[in-house]
Image: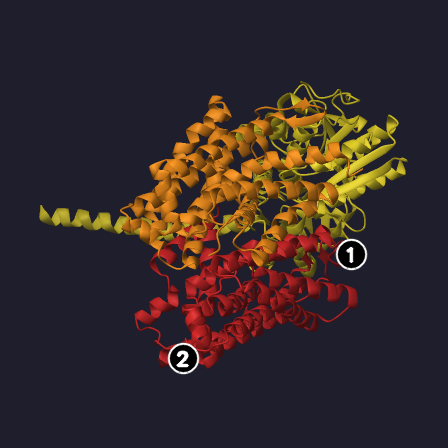
Chain colours: A red, B yellow, C orange
Amino acid sequence: MTGLRVLGVAAALAALLLPAGAPAYLLGVGLQLFMYATLAGSWNVISGFTGYTSFGHVAFFGIGAYTAAILITRLGMAWPWAALAGGAMALLLGLPVGAICLRLKGPYFAIAMLGFAESLRLLATLWTSLTKGGTGITLPPIQTLVPTYYAMLACAAAVLALNYWIATSSFGLRLLSIREDERGAEAIGINTTTHKIAAFALSTVFPGIVGGVYSQYITYIDPSSVFLALITVQTIIMTILGGAGTVLGPVLGATAISVVQEVLWARFPHVHQGLLGALIIFVILFLPGGVVEVLKERRILPRVRSI
Amino acid sequence: MEMKRGAALERRVLSAAAVVALAVLVVPFGREVAAQQKQPIRVGASLSLTGQLSRSGVEQEHGYKLWLEDVNARGGILGRPVELVLYDDKSDPATGAKLYEKLITVDKVDLLVGPYSSPVTFAVSAITEKYQVPMLATGAAARNIFERGFKYIFQVATLSEFYMIGAVEIAAKHGAKTMVAVAENTLFTQECAQGARDHAKKHGIQVLHYEEYSRGATDLAPLILKTKRLNPDLFIGCTYLPEAILLTRQMKDLDFAPKLFGFSVGVALPDYVKSLGRDAEAIFGSSQWEPGVRLPGAREFAEKFRKAFKFEPSYHAAQGYAGGLLMERAVNESKSLDKEKLRDFLAKLDTTTLYGRYQVNDKGLQIGKPAFLIQIQEGRKVIVWPDDAAEAKYVYPFPGWKK
Amino acid sequence: MLLDPALLLQTALSGILLGAVYALLAGGLNLIFGVMRIINVAHADLMMLGAYNTFWLFSLWGVNPLLGLLGGMPVLFALGWGLQRFLVSRVVRASELTSLLLTFGISIVIVNVGLYAFTGDFRSVAYLSGSIVVRGMALSKVRLVAFAVALAITVAVFLFLRWHPWGRAIRATSQHADLALACGIDVDLVRLGTFGLAAALAGAAGSLISMMYSIYPEMGAFFLLKSFAIIILGGRGSFPGAFVGALILGLIESFTALWTTATHAEAAAYVTLILMLLLKPSGLLGEEE
């Protein structure tokens, strides 16, 4: 147990101190990892804990990216505030959408969310007066990656804390009961509607924020790059691989996939995507609980809900 | 007897040891000497080797690799052999930016050449500007890359806005008064359409209708029906290959035959003629470059490419090759690898390569190179505009759809 | 101008001709959903394989694409059977998310195998071109043929499901798998056959599409969402519903393109999807669940 604690502290320290010694390239790798850890962890809230699989989570990332980009370029807002505004906008839009779509069951919710994300992409393409449509928005270039790195790290840490809180609280327990048996949960008096909506709302905020941070980092966004279905895909793969419904799952999954991608991509550049697909099949068939589950079974990780 | 064998053995071992010792001492020393004289010059780039744009990215890679062979056959640059450090950016801008950061700060390459596609180049140029390393944007045609006042980025290809002006020019010469344009709703095609419309207005041609469609459109018939009703003299489609084919097919289906029409991307690709057969006849298209163009080194390059890869080179390969060539020239003539010297050289250079003329303005925008207009004649594509590069006279007006 | 009857009729025809091909694709998806309660994310990629099958037969050996279609269907049937037998059957009893993710993984593998084997180049089959003109209305020849073939196959499958014992077994399993099992139907075999049949239909749709559009390994993505919209529109699990839904979507797309722009037309599928999910999730012809 203490070995794990040491490992955890060491990892946290390494993450915090990386900018001090590492080349800029590693910072780029690191911040993308934290970005995905945030997305995965947020998806985990509505899909892992509550059992409502969303296939359109990139919608909130895109909302955040566009909100921040518009505020930065039109109102000259400083990017940290713009990114936070992105999160707020994602929440604002997420609430009504969640309220409506969460009435659907299982795969219908998944598809509806996919439809929502695609609709947003088209909306961004058509609403040219606001978003400049397919031409995209150009942002001022940035000089150093360090603030972006810490921003992403902060979001990843916040989402990890959120997951921990959900896993160890009674709120989280009620979400799990909705996942396992929604009707049963209703029967024992849980207001499933408010709980689902709350979970959904929580899951939208951080993707919005990292979307905002992303747009100032990448300095150019257009509808197809920030409402990219691949982003949802990667988020889902990471969480499932790591272990949906666990605290460390999304983080481990994000790390593992980022590493695996780099290795596969370097060694097998033309087939790394296909291998990723094969990996998903493998995990679904043989490791449905994800890596965390495997580690818990092997007693490497303690079998507690807080992990 | 045994004493002799033992001694012989001992001697053998000793002499073997001596040889090994010599080898260990001499060979690396010799290598060291050789290495100091022949430290390779490393040229770095990332390309879309996988992902959506891999088709073109791989072609550009072929171009870089052919240039590498040729430059080393010429003795390298400044007498040193040249090495290529190539990564795959998966057609993703963020990945491209990450990789160029790596090329500059970790791999510490000497020279940079560009990735493929405007979005990736846009992200990458921010990195090269930050580190003040000059880069030839070999695979980018969008204007927005060059609107940020950057000093270290130089465009090689023709700007997207100029792709279709040849068609507008020819139409204007023949008295066209009206035009309809359609474009895919993404950056490159939108800029291309804007350029065409602006040029049309300059020639007094009225733009009756402009409409955008999404990639992957399955039915452009309503769009064509609307256009047909307006009966324009000129019809411009700023498209990629699939929609160029789709529009052509549906135009024939609905019997829409304006006097002149063309598409930005697609007509120059072999698949256009293959898919449409005789229906492709007399249709115009835009091309950054063609193997048959009358430019120095173009034919030789095309020959080499055909031999090496067994198919016709497209302009992506040529632009890769040209990028290498221009960088080589910059280093050879400045006699140095100093970034500032190279930057200044590339900013002032005015020359013609196998790809076309290279001359940039103070923003790094390519202003010397035109986009060629091609037309399908007898199943072959021929350059018909501008006049000084034309292989054949264009056919006008469109003779109508064959039954 | 935009309410001119000739124009409206032409647009409607355009939408209907296209709809029939969508129907083949969505119909198969609906079969799988009905019988196995699985959303086959890889469905449109099976279509892509059918398209390439026809393309290669045509461009290498000059095989008429319609023959290629007929030849491709058994190949796709076998592939579908194999996928069900070795992969999908393992998750039929698991949660819907699991099967969704599994087929999703299969989809990625198929697309990348396609990219590797066929490269990302756009291809198309140069079969018929031009149109026949009927009362001033231009009907694209190739789309007419595609429509006719799609309709014929749809009718054949519909009759099969109605009258043939195996078809009825499929419908029985789709209505209530456990009860069907109790009645002596070999439900596992039905599932294998259903997946195979659905894959064959997807392959046929792909063959038709290769005659009309450019194909490339990632083409599935565009058609998948439309297929979802159609099965929701027409009613999940209902095979004739998919046909009706497809025609309706085709009409919606065409008229949206006519009255607004082609970009808006793309949104038509998504908006339809969302509206249907919110207003009548069981679809126009589906049963309430």
**Residue positioned most to the right:** B204
The spot of residue B301 in percent (x, y) is 62, 31
- Residue C17, picture quadrant: top right
| Lateral position of residue C145 relative to residue A11, left or right | right
The spot of residue C9 in percent (x, y) is 70, 33
Quadrant of the frame with the N terminus of chain B: top left
Q: Chain of mark 1?
A: A
User: What residue is drawn where x is 28% and y is 45%?
Assistant: C186
Q: Can residue B96 be seen?
A: no
The spot of residue C176 in percent (x, y) is 37, 52
User: What residue is drawn where x is 56% and y is 31%?
Assistant: C147
Residue beneath disc 1: A129
Q: Which of the two labelled residues, at mark 2 and mark 1, occupies the earlier sequence position? A: 2
Residue beneath disc 2: A5
User: What residue is drawn where x is 31% and y is 47%?
Assistant: C187
Mark 1 nearby-residue class (10 Å; few <14, some 14–19, many ≥20): few
